[in-house]
Image (cartoon, helix red, strand yellow):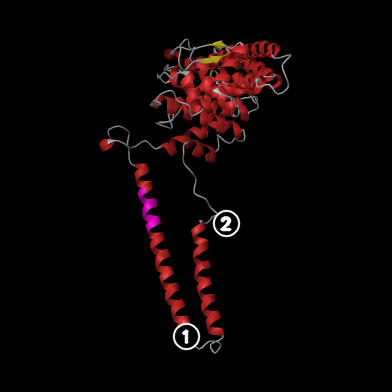
Amino acid sequence: MRYQIPDPYHPTLLPLLISAEDGLARLDERTNRHAVEDGFRERGHFFDAAAALWVAGELVHVEDLVLHDAHMDARAPTHELTIAHSVIRARRRIWLAEPAWALSPQGLAALRGEQLPPVNAVGTPAEARLEPQSSATGNDRHLEVDDEPDANPMAAEFAAIDAAIARSQQLLEAHDKDTLEVAERAARVTAQEPMGQLGLLFDEEWDEDARIDEWRQVVATADQLPASLGAALLFDAWERIEPLRRQHWMGSLLVGAYLRSRGKVTSHLLSFNAGQKVVRHERRRSQDPVTRWSAFLEAMTVTADLGLKELDRLSLAKTQMEMRIRDRRSNSSLPALIELVLSRPIVSATLVAQHVGVTPRGALNLVRELGIREMTGRGRYRGWGVL
């Protein structure tokens, strides 16, 4: 389908645009100067991953996500949990890369789980350079043997043996190359074929590469708009074009990457899905483009407000916990526990023991000394965190 760009400067959007721009600027400025910046950024990965599944109609508990990320699952992970963890890994990869990496063809291919074919400096495959080199090496070997025919009485026999070995090596390399080409051709055909019995589960004419190229063409138009309005354009285009069938949640992550590349939110990767939870589904999926853009800008404003409140909670909790360890010895394990609590939505005794380097019983003692609130309300697999 061809995406039709609506009027970005509709009178209804201007107040919402101003509110979103102001909220994001305040959040970014405060996060850059805040003492809990690292913890706020890491907690945002977990909350946004759980919210992304919530927007898609699935429920993932944050405590299960934290334990799954630490390889300490209390039960067998569900399909939804593995998808949420994929969101976390994608967010971390986007954040560790360059600001504009996620919007580039290489970044999109890497996030999709694909890899562009490697080429050398002149643009030819690596195999094309190895074949002449191997044949030239064989010829040099023959020349070296033929240069001194009288040096060894068995030179002719050795030359025949070397020629036979060279021919055998060429046959093996040709066979390996043919096998590799057949495997690559079969892999390409398999990737193009729809998954599922007789193609009933997926659309056979769904071309992800063409759809992604169509979406990337909108980036040039978005760059001419204010950052928040350009992000709204990209997200709405992603929702309407639907480039990826199995990774539709990637659109909200690319919104955060785009705002970072524009310099609007550079302190962290915006947790946009947390704001989408507040907006009703009817507005987010409306047929009217102005309604959808209004819902996007409102969700962005809500995300900024939630981020500011989260910074207040973390700052207050950090101050209270530091007051408890003011007179402790310098080699105490409590500072490491404070850092862990501020960087995770919830922690367990096993997670504390692994991170701090104490026994599970010692972890419970540290949690009790720090006065962290218990959040699960159960006897087994208890968890503590900052509310």
Q: Which residues are magenta?
A: 179-186
The image position of residue 123, as x and y in percent, is 54, 54
Q: Residues within 10 Å of mark 2 (few under 14, many from 20)?
A: few
Q: Is residue 220 depicted above or below 268 in this figure?
A: below
The image position of residue 98, as x and y in percent, is 62, 35
Query: In the rendered image, is residue 250 in sight?
Result: no
The image position of residue 192, as x and y in percent, is 36, 42
| Residue 179 location, quadrant | bottom left
Q: Residue at x 54, y 38 (%)?
A: 107
Q: Is residue 278 depicted above or below 336 in this figure?
A: above
Query: What amino acid is found at the position of numbered circle 1 in the picture?
Result: Ala
- Quarter in which the C terminus is drawn: top right
Horizontal side of 194 relative to 18 (left or right) equals left
| Residue 224 location, quadrant | top right
Badge 2 is on which residue?
A: 122
Query: In the rendered image, is residue 279 in sight?
Result: yes
N-terminal-most mark, 1 or 2: 2
Q: Residue at x 49, y 49 (%)?
A: 117
- Quarter in which the N terminus is drawn: top left
Q: Main secondary structure of the magenta part?
A: helix
* Mark number displayed over residue 156: 1
The image position of residue 51, as x and y in percent, is 48, 19
Query: What amino acid is found at the position of numbered circle 2 in the picture?
Result: Val
As for residue 122 lying within the magenta part, the answer is no
